[in-house]
Amino acid sequence: MAALDAVLTRIDSNLDQALDRLFALIAIPSISTDPTYAADCRRAAEWLVGELQSLGFDTALRPTEGHPMVVAKARTGRQGAPHLLFYGHYDVQPPDPLDLWETPPFAPRMADMPTGKQIIGRGVADDKGQLMTFVEACRAYKETAGALPCDVTILLEGEEESGSASLPAFLAANRDELAADLVLVCDTGMWDRETPAITTMLRGLVLEEVVIHAADRDLHSGMFGGAAVNPIHVLAKIIADLHDETHRITLPGFYDGVAELPPEIAEQWRHLPQEGHDFLGDVGLSEPAGEKGRSLQEMLWARPTCDVNGIIGGYTGKGSKTVLPAQASAKFSFRLVGQQDPEKIAASFRSFVHARLPADCHVEFISHGASPAHQLPFSSEALTRAVAALRAEWNTEPVLAGCGGSIPIVGAFKQDLGMDALMIGFGLDDDRIHSPNEKYELSSFHKGARSWARVLAALAG
Ligand code: BES
Ligand code: ZN
């Protein structure tokens, strides 16, 4: 206990230097999806290597076909110490649209708001500020106790925001090195600014692009209209057929593996503190649009979805043009829960589309990834210990939450290496991740590091 107190005090007294380090990382524009920034992604990885090396981690920059991985190891030498794999990502989303940023996205700054101080910059909440909460907790242990209480391997990737393309092969090739008792992830959110959360349910994700081809060229809609098939209409009908009038998804077998919530979790979710929460109102909406008879929290955390994220076809320029397009395309995303099988859902979707293709149309499918959901068993010992650690830091009961978003590799940790993930993040719903003026609360950063120090102590036993 004395050791933990010293670690916490160290985090408090080191906050200014910790912020300097975080600002240096944010200033590197590590945008993974845009090849123009490949050297910056590498620079961010190298910066992290230097940081972890200076903390005494056995650290290496590991090349992949895409952006490099950072792997860093610290061992206690203590028999029976739990081995934890901390996962985070150093890549960020593109900052566009740039003109909506009040200050440049990669020139981090501190803003004084009525609710407290905020750090502003692209990637600060997703995921640089979050991953640095863990690194700063490790630093405080190293600088006070001289060692961490658990064996820790840190794995930081640079492609999460573009689908983690290189990570599955990297995991497969380095199983023995990366296998641990438990994965820790800091890439999710709190319930609200006073209430921490442990994400026990993370949704999976299937991304499918569909291109429907009809005539071999664009046609005059007067000369051919009425006789020639219109691929936009075909696509629109497919999209409309995907939900029934109760907003359930109609794909055959789609709900296989979707379980009802355990009653005690449903009960906890019904009683979440609601003060200051207007989830839809905050974005100009009022009515939940998901499945009839489900609560908002269920829709977001415990039910699967099917969404169209983009649709293209025909003439979209200024004015009008009387044209029957030769093709139409759309991008679909399915968020998965429970035991839903991503491969089966992709296959069911493809046959659903095929079954609705009229004569003279053919379809092309492009997969952009498929990852399963993750569920941490509610009976997990690590979960019980983490709850106690967070309760001690925040003086309130942590929420066992779901996460509507996805972290594609978490499913692979479970499927390929048999590891569960304990996901504790300090983001807030209004952090504007993936949006202009992304921010992270100073209290998230500071108490996040303190929380990890406590969680590490709790997991060490
Ligand atoms: N950190 C997010 C996941 C997240 C989203 C956590 C919302 C909490 C709230 C993660 O980096 C992310 O954005 N994932 C993408 C995955 C996609 C780009 C393959 C997502 O969920 O869309
Ligand atoms: Zn993230």
Image (spheres, rainbow, N blue to C red):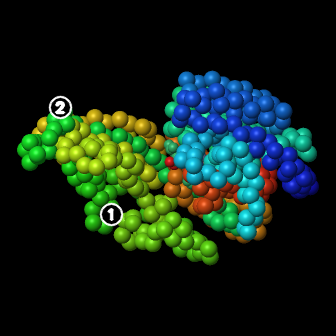
Q: Who's the residue at 61% across and 61% down the image?
A: 430
Residue 149 pos. (x, y %): 82, 45
Position of 302 with respect to 123 (left or right) is: left
Position of 126 with respect to 109 (left or right) is: left
Q: Is residue 394 above or below residue 152?
A: below
| In the foreground, 32 or 377 | 32
Look at mark 2 in the image and give the residue it sits on.
216
In contact (CB < 8 Å): disc 1 and disc 2: no
| In the foreground, 280 or 141 | 280
| In the foreground, 16 or 146 | 16
Residue 197 pos. (x, y %): 64, 61
Mark 1 or mark 2, whichever is nearer to me: 2
Task: Kindly report the distance in space between the C-alpha atoms of the residues bearing marks 1 and 2.
Answer: 36 Å
Q: Provide the secondary structure element on which disc 1 rests.
A: loop
- Disc 1 packing (10 Å; few <14; some 14–19; many ≥20): some
Q: Who's the residue at 53% across and 35% down the image?
A: 33
Q: Provide the secondary structure element on which disc 2 rests.
A: loop
Q: Is residue 268 above or below residue 161?
A: below
Look at mark 1 in the image and give the residue it sits on.
247
* Badge 2 amino acid: Asp
N-term mark: 1 or 2: 2
* Badge 1 amino acid: His
Question: Is residue 380 something that shows in the picture?
Answer: no
Q: Who's the residue at 86% across and 46% down the image?
A: 17
Position of 136 with respect to 202 (left or right) is: right
Residue 2 pos. (x, y %): 92, 55
- Seen as rendered, the residue at the extreme front is 319
User: Does mark 1's beta carbon lie closer than 8 Å to ligand 1?
Assistant: no
Question: Is residue 301 something that shows in the picture?
Answer: yes
